[in-house]
Amino acid sequence: MSDATLNSDYPGVGRLSFFLSKLGIVVASICSTIYFGPGSAVVRVVSLLVLVAGFILDVMRLRNIGVSQWFALLRLLPYLNLILAIGLLCAQTGWIETRRLDHEGIIIASICGALVVIMIVAFLSVRMSSLIPI
């Protein structure tokens, strides 16, 4: 199947556009918090806009990979939102047809998995070091 067929059959946001949009949302959040301060009304409005934009991006990405848009509600549940985010980053356009990741998707999944393991080890090492008396 050619890429032109996949792109026309699966509307939405591709993998690179999804990543760059999410990155832009994070940068906008950080910049508004630094400039206006964490307790300002502007940051509250920006936070609401970021929440809505992130949800819309997730729905568009789910359409692109061919999965039901109702899975976007998983972003409201702790720990499942991490699995959803990694899945949306890894899956290629039209993933539903093959249900297998392409080479780039496997690389992205490996990097995300390694980062999750590093975060868990760092968290546990901090917890263990706080239990040891000095």
Image: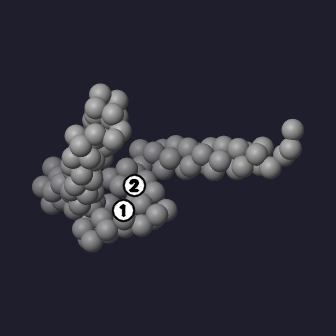
Find residue 16 and name its label.
none
Task: State the quadrant of the N terminus.
Answer: bottom left
| Relative image position of residue 118 (x, y in whole percent) | 62, 44
Give the residue number, with chain letter if any, for mark 1.
75
Tag 1–tag 2 contact (CB < 8 Å): yes
| Residue 22 visible at all | yes
Picture quarter containing residue 95? Answer: bottom left
What is the secondary structure assignment of the residue under circle 2? helix
What is the secondary structure assignment of the residue under circle 1? helix
Q: Is residue 133 left or right of residue 74?
A: right
Task: State the quadrant of the C terminus.
Answer: top right
Is residue 77 or residue 86 the one in the foreground? 77
Q: In the image, is residue 87 above or below residue 128?
A: below
Label 2 CA crowd tier, 10 Å (few <14, some 14–19, many 20+)? some
Q: Residue at x 45, y 45 (%)?
A: 108
Q: Is residue 32 left or right of residue 79?
A: left
Residue type at mark 2 is Ala
Q: Earlier in the sequence, mark 1 or mark 2?
A: 1
| Residue 100 visible at all | no
| Relative image position of residue 53 (x, y in whole percent) | 22, 51
Q: Residue at x 28, y 32 (%)?
A: 36
Residue type at mark 1 is Arg
Give the residue number, with chain letter if any, for mark 2.
85
Is residue 25 or residue 100 the one in the foreground? 25
| Relative image position of residue 12 (x, y in whole percent) | 18, 54
